[in-house]
Image (tube, grey):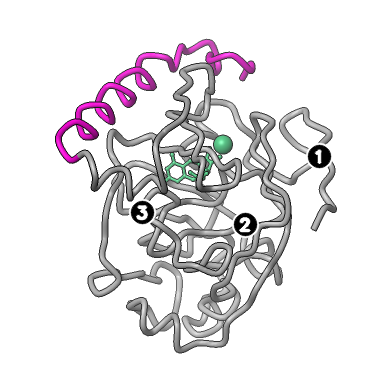
Amino acid sequence: MDRDGTAAGKPVGRRVVLGVAALGAVGVAFGAKIQNGLDGALATVSSKDPTGLTGLLPGGGGFRFYSVSDSIPHRSAADYKLTVDGLVDKPATYSLADLLALPQTKLVKDVQCVTGWRVPKTEFTGVLLSRLLDAAGVKPEGKAIRFTCFDGVYSESLTLAEARRPDMMVAHQMNGSPVTDAHGGPVRLYAAPMYFYKSAKWLSGITVTDRVMPGYWEHYGYDVEAWVGRSNGRNDDPTSG
Ligand SMILES: Nc1nc2c(c(=O)[nH]1)N[C@H]1C(S)=C(S)[C@@H](COP(=O)(O)O)O[C@H]1N2
Ligand SMILES: [Mo]
């Protein structure tokens, strides 16, 4: 994928432009509500970014808003559900309260997007994936995880070994506050050592699979193994934080 809007020879601009148009329409229709959802006004919207619709989130300390779907999906804290299934002995469904009742982990690290922007020292709080996997009991054939989202579009993957690392979690807090709708709340994946496209927002499903099933952007050319600093042809500092 090149850096200005084409992926594997496929222009992605149209989708992005449609996304911007749809967001505009939603913004007109629901004015105040969408502003809240975005932590403030969208300062810039760029169609140059191959990883989707982006707009700077001024309240978000340099974060950019991304969604490959045409709007910001919303799920209330009360309605939220996270399913763990696939090659496991005990499939489970967690409410947000269930997740909050589990031991919590806090990670502070720079967020690094593959398109170059970086947000230093961002704190995420949540539950380690390894805990959820241990509770589910991964069958011997289970080798990877597929993550799905309630936007109905996005997906991501990790190998089982990656998912069991102590810096891979499902996060419900960012910088001490609940993860907002715009940032993928109530619960998003936080794959700390990898480029931010791995951190699937609006997480709804964790499925143990027998092989890695490449995620959304990986079909457009991004590396499945998305280590910061040693993937996607980039040399960002992987250690900050
Ligand atoms: N469901 C979903 N998750 C997603 C994306 C998306 O479009 N949809 N974009 C990814 C990309 S490319 C980035 S850089 C981050 C952006 O997170 P943010 O919007 O909180 O800054 O989310 C990742 N997770
Ligand atoms: Mo991204």
Residue 239 drawn at (x, y percent): 85, 53
Residue carrying label 1: 230
Looking at the rendering, the stretch of residues picked out in magenta corresponds to: 1-30
In this view, 33 is above or below 134:
above
Residue drawn at (61%, 20%), measured in percent from left and top?
A: 1
Residue 38 drawn at (x, y percent): 38, 45
Cβ atoms at labels 3 and 1 below 8 Å apart: no
Query: Label 3: few (<14), some or many (≥20) within 10 Å?
Result: many
Q: Please tell me which of labels 2 and 1 falls first in the chain.
A: 2
Locate the C terminus and report the quarter of the image it occupies. Answer: bottom right
Residue carrying label 2: 191
Q: Label 3 to label 2, Cα distance in Å?
A: 18 Å
Residue 226 appears left or right of 87: right
Q: Which mark is residue 181?
A: 3
In this view, 29 is above or below 169:
above
- Give the image quarter of residue 21: top left
Residue 70 appears left or right of 46: left
Q: Main secondary structure of the magenta part?
A: helix
Q: Which mark is residue 10?
A: none
- Type of the residue with mark 2: Ala
Q: Secondary structure at mark 2?
A: strand
Q: Please tell me which of labels 3 and 2 falls first in the chain.
A: 3
- Type of the residue with mark 1: Arg
Cβ atoms at labels 3 and 2 below 8 Å apart: no
Residue 237 appears left or right of 88: right
Q: Label 2 to label 1, Cα distance in Å?
A: 15 Å
